[in-house]
Image: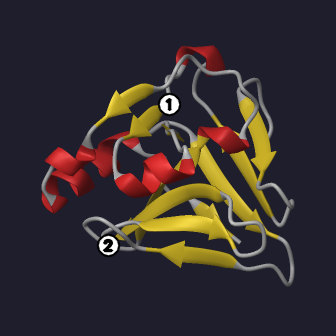
Amino acid sequence: MAGPHALSGRCHCGDIAVSVQLSGAAEHYSPRACDCDFCRLHGASYLSDPKGQLRFTVRSGAVLNRYRQGAEEADMLLCGRCGVLVGACYEREGERYGVVNAAVLPPLFAAPQPVSPKQLSADEKTRRWMLLWFPDVGIG
């Protein structure tokens, strides 16, 4: 992805690359720090833009592990080699929505804001994801 608001990152070992195209300048985004046990243990905070683009590229021969936890609606995406949590995605009716863990991108964002999805039902979570997350996420 190219453009004035394009960012790239990767997991620790480099097996999974992340490309992001934001609709605005990075410093205007505040990643969301989820308070669930899984995300807290990974130190994750998530960046999304419903008007942007997100792509995860897995190096040939590498492994992208998927793990479902919580409401078991979204796949947490982890590198099979170094274990870094790179993001999450949710699929519904042929569409894939996703977020990226801001920790795998350059530190350009405003401070993370705490969120508490544990308080939401599975339906409330998925509706929220479809409004806030990147649409049409590529994984390849």
- Relative placement, left or right, of 127 versus 28 is left
Residue 93 disc label: 2
Residue 104 disc label: none
Residue 31 disc label: 1
Any part of residue 75 in sight: yes
- Amino acid on which the number 2 mark rests in the picture: Glu
Q: Dividing the picture into quarters, in which one does residue 3 lie?
A: top right
Report x, y in % for residue 16. Answer: 77, 63
Q: Is residue 23 above or below residue 35?
A: above
Q: Residue at x 43, y 57 (%)?
A: 38
Instruction: Report the number of discs.
Output: 2
Q: Is residue 102 above or below residue 79?
A: above
- Amino acid on which the number 1 mark rests in the picture: Pro
Q: Residue at x 55, y 44 (%)?
A: 43
Mark 1 or mark 2, which is nearer the start of the sequence?
Answer: 1
Q: Dividing the picture into quarters, in which one does residue 97 lie?
A: bottom left
- Relative placement, left or right, of 125 versus 59 is left
Q: Is residue 28 above or below residue 51?
A: above
Residue located farthest toward the bottom when viewing the structure as drawn: 61
Report x, y in % for residue 56. Answer: 69, 60
- Relative placement, left or right, of 15 versus 80 is right
As helix, strand or loop, the secondary structure at mark 2 comes to loop
Characterize the local packing of mark 2: few (<14), some (14-19) or many (20 or more) Cα atoms within 10 angstroms: few
- Image quarter hosting the N terminus: top right
